[in-house]
Image (cartoon, rainbow, N blue to C red):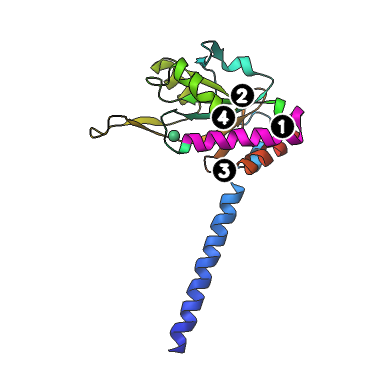
C-alpha cells in the first residue's frame, strides 16, 4: 500500500509543522510589540493594573504609588499553592538573581511583588515565613478580603476557592500571569506562569534597556 504510506508521511509532516508553529507562537507571546513604547495605551490588556492598598509581610501598609520609579513584577497566588505559585516565584527570583549578576543596576530597578488571593490563610505571619524561600527583595502582600478583591480586579485576576469536602485544606483556583509594570505604574507586558527564569530575565533586559 504505497499510497497509504505517502499519505501517512504527509499527515505526519503537517502535524510537525503545526507543532512547530505552536511552539514558535508560544515562544513569542511574552513580548507583544505594542507594549514597547511605554506610553499610555488605551486598549485591551493595557488596562491591567491600578491602585491598591495592602499590608506587606512586615505588617506595613503599602500602596501601588509607593513603588513609583521602579519596575514591578506582580504575581498573584497563595502560599498553600502546591505547585504553580512556588514554581513561578522561583522563576521570578532566579530571573532577578541572574539579572543582578550581569547588571546589578538593572536588577535594582525591579521590585518583585507577590499578592495573595487567599487572605484568609495568608496572614502577615504566613507571608513572612514564606518570603525567605524566594528572594530577599520579594514583597508579599495581603489584606482584607475586600482589599484583595479590589487589587485583583485592577489586575484582571480571577480567583476562587475550590470547594472539596473530602479535603481538609482547600485549594484556590487562580489566573497565573507575571505582570511587568513600568516605573509610572502602567502595564508593560506579562509573562506566562510557565516562563523559565532565563526567558523572564531576557524580557526584563529588553524592556528595561529599551
Ligand atoms: Ni497557585
Residue at position x 59%, y 43% from top?
196
Which residue position is annotated with label 4?
A: 134
Secondary structure under tag 2 reads: loop
Which of discs 3 and 2 lies nearer the camera? The answer is: 2
Which residue position is annotated with label 1?
A: 100
Q: CA distance from mark 1 to mark 4?
A: 15 Å
Residue 87 belongs to the span the image colors magenta: yes
Crowd rating for badge 3 (residues with CA inside 10 Å; few <14, some 14–19, many 20+): some
Which residue position is annotated with label 3?
A: 195
Residue at position x 43%, y 17% from top?
123
State left or right for residue 111 relative to residue 60.
Answer: right
Which residue position is annotated with label 2?
A: 136
- Give the mark, 3 or 4, whose residue is nearer the N terminus: 4
Badge number at residue 165: none
- Give the mark, 1 or 3, whose residue is nearer the N terminus: 1
Return the x and y of residue 21 as percentages of the image width and height: 56, 59
Secondary structure under tag 1 reads: helix
Q: CA distance from mark 3 to mark 2?
A: 21 Å
Amino acid at each position: 500500500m504505497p499510497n497509504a504510506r505517502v499519505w501517512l508521511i504527509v499527515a505526519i509532516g503537517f502535524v510537525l509543522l503545526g507543532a512547530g508553529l505552536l511552539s514558535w507562537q508560544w515562544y513569542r507571546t511574552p513580548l507583544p510589540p505594542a507594549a514597547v513604547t511605554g506610553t499610555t495605551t488605551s486598549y485591551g490588556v493595557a488596562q491591567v493594573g491600578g491602585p491598591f492598598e495592602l499590608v506587606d509581610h512586615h505588617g506595613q501598609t503599602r500602596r501601588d504609588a509607593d513603588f513609583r520609579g521602579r519596575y514591578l513584577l506582580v504575581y498573584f497566588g497563595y502560599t498553600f499553592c502546591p505547585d504553580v505559585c512556588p514554581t513561578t516565584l522561583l522563576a521570578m527570583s532566579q530571573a532577578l538573581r541572574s539579572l543582578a549578576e550581569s547588571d546589578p543596576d538593572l536588577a535594582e530597578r525591579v521590585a518583585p511583588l507577590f499578592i495573595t488571593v487567599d487572605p484568609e490563610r495568608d496572614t502577615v505571619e504566613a507571608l513572612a515565613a514564606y518570603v525567605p524561600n524566594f528572594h530577599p527583595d520579594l514583597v508579599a502582600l495581603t489584606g482584607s478580603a475586600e482589599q484583595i478583591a479590589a487589587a485583583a480586579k485592577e489586575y484582571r485576576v480571577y480567583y476562587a476557592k475550590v470547594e472539596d469536602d473530602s479535603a481538609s485544606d482547600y485549594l484556590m483556583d487562580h489566573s497565573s500571569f507575571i505582570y511587568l509594570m513600568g516605573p509610572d505604574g502602567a502595564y508593560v507586558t506579562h509573562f506566562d506562569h510557565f516562563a523559565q527564569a532565563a526567558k523572564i530575565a531576557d524580557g526584563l533586559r529588553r524592556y528595561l534597556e529599551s
